[in-house]
Each structure stands twice: as C-alpha cells, then as structure tokens.
Amino acid sequence: MAGWGAAGDRNEARKIRSAAMPVTFAGTVGLFMAAAKPSTGTAVLFLSPWGFEEMCVRKFWRILAEDLADIGIASLRFDYAGTGDALDVLDGGEGLSPWEDTAFAAATKLKSLSGCERLILISQGLGSTLAAPLAERLSNIDGIAFLAPVISGRAHLRELAIWSKMIDESMGLSETQRQTEGVTVAGLRMPDTVADAVKKLNLMNLAGLATPNCLVLTRPNRPGDADFACHVKALAPHVDQAEYEGYDELVSNPTIAVMPAETGRAVVAWTGSIAGQAHAVASVGFEAASVAPLVGDGFAETPLRFGRDHRLFGILCEPEGKRTGATALLLTTAYDRNAGWGRMSVIMARALACDGIASLRFDTANVGDSPPLPDAPEQVLYSREQQHDVAEALDLLETRKLLPAFVVGRCSGGYLAFQAAVHDARCHGLVTANPYSFSWDESRSVDEALRFAPRSLETYGRKFLQLETLKRLIGGQIDAKSALRNLATVLSRRAARSARRLLGVLPFLAGTQGPVINGFRTLSKRRVDMSLIYSAHDIGLDHLHEHFGQDASGLKHFPGIRLTLIAEADHNLTPPNARRIYLQEVKEMGLRLGKA
C-alpha cells in the first residue's frame, strides 16, 4: 500500500500530492480528501481523540485519508468545537453536546461533498465515545472502527492525570510550574463540562450499535479493551478484533512518533472491504471554491492550501479592522500541527489580529496535514527542504500583499526561522524561542538527537536532587547510559567554553562557529529586527554561549538584538506567564515593523 514506508516509496510516480481541501462549517475547519478514483459510494468520517493524543495522531489520520482516497474512498477530518483550529466555545453547553453537534455537522458536510449517503466512522480515544451516539443520529452507517477506545471515562481521566505528569516531567517542569487545574495535558485544558461528562462515560453500557460492522483495535496490556471487543461482538453481527500494533510508539511524543504501518494497512483494508460492498457511484466534482472564513472576536481565519500543486496546508488569520503591523509567519515546532503546542499558535494568531497584525501558520511538508515532497528524506527536521516550504509561504503573503513579514518559531521552528531569515530577504524580522541550535551539522543523526537530547546542567542538577528521580534511576525507568552521555556532553561544552575564556579566545570569532556568526552578520547588515528568547535553564542557552560567550557578551557586536530570559519556564513555554512574554515580544516586533 502506497501510504507506508519511505517518502520515495510513498510517491512512486514522483508526483506531488496536494493537501486535503479545507472547508469550514459549524465554527470549525475540516479537511476533505476526495476519492482519487471512482467512488465506492461510501465515505469515511474521522473522529479524533482529544488533546495530546490528537496531536500525535494528526499525521496518522492524514496518511490514512490519502490511502483511502487511493482506493476510491473520500473522507473528512475536523476539529471539535473549541479545539485545534475551531472557534472557541463561548457557551460551554452541556457535556459533550458541542463536540457531538460538530461531529453531526461534519457528517452532513461529508455527505454533501462526497455525494455518498453511506458512511464509515473511524474513531480513536475519546472520539470512540462519540461514534455510537452519532451512528444513532445518522442513517446508513456501514461500519465503526474503534481504535484504542476510551471505555471507562473515569479511568481515562485518571490516565490523563498520569500522562500529564509524565509529559511535564519530561519537559523539566517543576511541581510549582505545572498546570494542575482541572484536566490539563501538555498545555491543553479540557472544559470542565466536558470532563464532567467524560467521567460518566462507560462504553460497556452500550445496549446497541446502529451499524452491522465493527473493528476494535485493542492496546497491549489493557485487558479492558478485549472485554469491550467481546461486548461489541454481542451488539453487531460482524466484528473484527486485532491488536493496535505501534500504539505506544505513536502516542508517546509527536516529535518522535512512529507511524503504525501495520495498523494503518489493517484499517484501510477493513474499510475497503466494507465500502466495496456498496454500489459504486461516480466521483463528485469538487471545485476549489473560496472557503468562508471563520470570524471571531477581532479576527477572521481562512484555511487554505498553497505552494506548488497546493501541497501545503495553513491558516491565514487577519484582523477584522485595519492592518497596522507586519505579518507574522508562525512556524511549526518539530511535528506539532500548526495549531501549536498547547494550541499556542492559535491563541497567538488571534491575539495578534486584535492588535492589527495578520499571521500565517502552516504545516511544513510531512508535518501534520501537509503531505511529504517526492524524494525528500522521511526526517524533515533540520532539513534544507523545509526552507522551500517557508519560501512558498512567503510567496503566498507576497501575492496577497501581506508583506512585510517576520518569522517566528520555537525549538526546531526557531532554527528554521533563523535559516529562513538568513536566506530570504523578505523576512524583515526574526523571533526565535529556545532554538536548540542555529546551524545543524548534517553528519549528525536528527533522530538520535531528538530521542536523546541533553538538558542544561542546571536542569540535571535540579532533577538529580529530586528523590523521585533517584527512585526511577535505581528502578531502571531512566536510561542511565543516555543520561550519563548527555551529562558528559554538557560538561564538555562548559569545559571548552571555560578554556576559551582562560585563553582569551572570543567565542564569536572561533572558526567552528562560522555558519552561525556569518548568519548573524547577514541579518545585521540587512537590519533585520532580531529577538532571541530563552527559558532560563534551556539547553539552547549552551549553544548560544558557545557562539557568544558565557554571558552572551558577543551579541554586542550585533546591535539591536534583544535577548530575553524567562524564569520558571520549560522548553515548550508551557506556563501561562512564559506564553505571555513570548506573545508580547512577537506583538511588539509586528507593530515596529509595521511602522518601518
């Protein structure tokens, strides 16, 4: 099947695949993937999980949609009300009703777009709790796939609490920095009304299913999943059960997530077998008509495709009133979808619009909802290929007369922002937050760096003194070999800087730092507005100090650069105060460049 394997295998004909067609309805954004051949007469509606799990599954959903299109099955993916790129919900409503209403509207939209009256629901996590009631509201549901379903809502909330603590700990957040109000995971808070409704859910209480076909993918070491599969077999005449191979590797972290190839093939094969039972219909022509923007308080957002062959997906956010600032190009971090970690990019874009600053946030190729480029490496982070994506985004802004522009990014997005500003004169400003580095040694393995990235010496010291960390180290829950190697790396960097200081060698003149310093010189000559933001103990500071000295005094050779250190913040800028500082720096740059 074309959707799995290396990027080259996925594009056998060396054709550039277009991103899905964006549509808007019911206050949300959907992505419609038309059938690439005569339709089977059945379309697929994806029902996503919530929060961190949804971020991890986003790319998997896109690959499934592409493979389904290749066998003649159209599909629609969408964000629930108040999540992702959807408008916020002012009135929380009752329980899950806002999400259920969005799902019902999505089903109606999918039928209209595809010309199919019959649907199959593919759900995961919390999305599985919406599948059965949605099938009751609709007619002609040919099948429901339950992928790692949430069976007991109460147990799921307990699991989310553990998940939240593990994620926060992995980011180096102290207990005082953690957001513990309500149900909060990775900076995303579940509405209290939704959490109350989830607590009462129990799929074992289902008395019926309005579909003849079901697929249940069970997670390893979760006996409750197998119990649910047995329960479903008593409710539907045709039930397939299999293991969700690769589940844990998929949902552990979007940065290092491994797409579950075998599971993907199984889901597509099951869906195709059911859709093939329907009478085939001619494909419905779908023109790329203009998409109605989503209008909120002070902003209007238009989802769009752009670039060569419409290969990239993004959201253009514009002020309702007069535009008074330069346009912010918000770059994704790692493999996070364009909405950002903890929905940070959505919140930032809408806040900027209220101050007259337009923005474009988008997925680079092979991230989130943008397909990979033919012949490009599967690992796109720190790749030169991503600079082409930024150039095409700037082309879009230029065509729409939205220049001048400035680039904004965090971590790997900060690296990409720096490189884009150096190579494209249309970038008049740069805001980079916690960049791991400014220049990447292409002989290094990106995958290994992502999995075993070192932390700052201060973070190691603080964590080593924690009793819980010592217990986990002794218990074998921490990879001691990797931890010691990373600690040695940090210490060696510190020693090298100390030696240079003793010898009177200015770091910013060291030959090994040429690409970085030359990049800063290029930006300085072009008078690019530059802002560097770091969490106080971020590992990126070690790289900054390597180039500009332990006190960053070398920055004085590049007048106008602003260096901001944020106390009590993690690498992802999860705490609210860190986000406010980040947003304020971006807003001030946008307004400055707008007056220039």
Image (cartoon, helix red, strand yellow):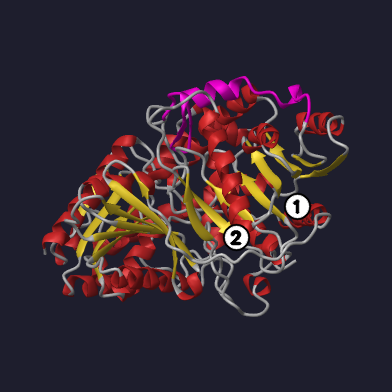
Other-residue count near label 2 (Cα within 10 Å), few / some / many at <14 / 14–19 / ≥20 = many
Q: What residue sits right under mark 1 in the picture?
A: 267
Question: Would residue 392 be seen by someone viewing this image from the given angle?
Answer: yes
Above or below, comparing residue 189 to residue 346 in the picture: above
The number of callouts visible is 2
Tell me whether the residue at label 1 lies in contact with that at label 2, contact meaning CB atoms closer than 8 angstroms.
no
Above or below, comparing residue 392 to residue 354 in the picture: below
State the image coordinates of residue 462 (x, y, percent, origin top left).
41, 35
Q: Tell me which residue sits at (72%, 58%) in the image.
A: 261
> What amino acid is at disc 1?
Val
State the image coordinates of residue 545 (x, y, percent, origin top left).
29, 57
Question: Would residue 442 be seen by someone viewing this image from the given angle?
Answer: no
State the image coordinates of residue 135 (x, y, percent, origin top left).
70, 37
Q: Which marked residue is nearer to the observer: mark 1 or mark 2?
A: 2
Other-residue count near label 1 (Cα within 10 Å), few / some / many at <14 / 14–19 / ≥20 = many
Is label 2 in a helix, a strand or a loop? strand
Is label 1 in a helix, a strand or a loop? helix
Q: Is 230 in front, or is 184? A: 230
Q: Tell me which residue sits at (67%, 51%) in the image.
A: 44
> Quarter of the image holding residue 329?
bottom left
Q: CA distance from mark 1 to mark 2?
A: 17 Å
Q: Tell me which residue sits at (48%, 47%) in the image.
A: 25
> What amino acid is at disc 2?
Met
Q: Which residues are magenta?
A: 179-208
Above or below, comparing residue 249 to residue 157 in the picture: below
Q: Is 465 in front, or is 593? A: 593
Q: Does the magenta-highlighted stretch encompass residue 502?
A: no
Q: What residue sits right under mark 2 in the picture?
A: 33
Left or right, 252 with reference to 516: right
